[in-house]
Amino acid sequence: MKRHRGLRRYYDRLSIANDFDRMKEFDFKNSKTWTENWHLHFDWRGYGNRSFKRREPRLDKLFRHFDLLISEIENQHNDLQLYAVLLDYNSSGDALFLHKPNANNSQFPFKTANLSKTTTLTNNPLNNYLDNLDDYEKMYGKANEAFCLLFKKSVGLPIE
């Protein structure tokens, strides 16, 4: 097995990096900027699929960016939705979403059907991680894979 060098530095950077600093093309503070389910993934290569130990730092980064995005959009009115979607075992699908009224006339506000407050996840470490998140509303469902949709009621329009 190939040994990877520099993992400590990689995980140290992962815990402090702000991906929004590199995004010059998107102006979060401008309330006239529209987004159609704009999203950001934190584990494109799916490293977290191998073990939850590798997934957890990426989830920490996702929720840190959730809070950073709240501070970026705080001057905007309630005409937005901010939420995260976590898949049961597919770490590369975990993403943070920002949805606003848009020129493509896609469904805004985003509404869901057939979601429950009872977990559908079979990944026990992920369930335990989500149980420790207190400030988030959690809704569970199943499409191709079980998933959890998370949002904060105090930010934008709630997911119904």
Image (cartoon, rainbow, N blue to C red):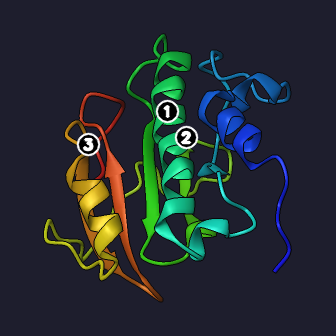
Q: Residue furthest left?
A: 118
**Residues tagged 2 and 3 counted as in contact (Cβ below 8 A):** no
What amino acid is found at the position of numbered circle 2 in the picture? Answer: Lys
Rendered position, 56 above or below 8: below
With 146 as the anchor, is 73 left or right in this view?
right
Q: Amino acid at mark 1?
A: Arg
Q: Are the residues tagged 2 and 1 within 8 Å (C-beta)? A: yes
Q: Disc 3 on helix, strand or loop? A: loop
Quadrant position of residue 14? top right
Give the amino acid type for the residue marked by disc 3 in the picture: Tyr
- How crowded pointer 1 is (Cα within 10 Å; few <14, some 14-19, many 20+) is rated as some
Q: Residue at x 47, y 66 (%)?
A: 52
Between the residue at mark 2 and the residue at mark 1, the CA separation in whole angstroms equals: 5 Å
Question: What is the secondary structure assignment of the residue under circle 2?
Answer: helix
Which dot marks residue 136? 3
How far across and down, in percent of the image, does residue 136 sit? Answer: 26, 42
Q: Give 40 or 28, whichever is nearer the viewer.
A: 40
Q: For the residues carrying marks 1 and 3, which lies nearer the camera in this image?
A: 1
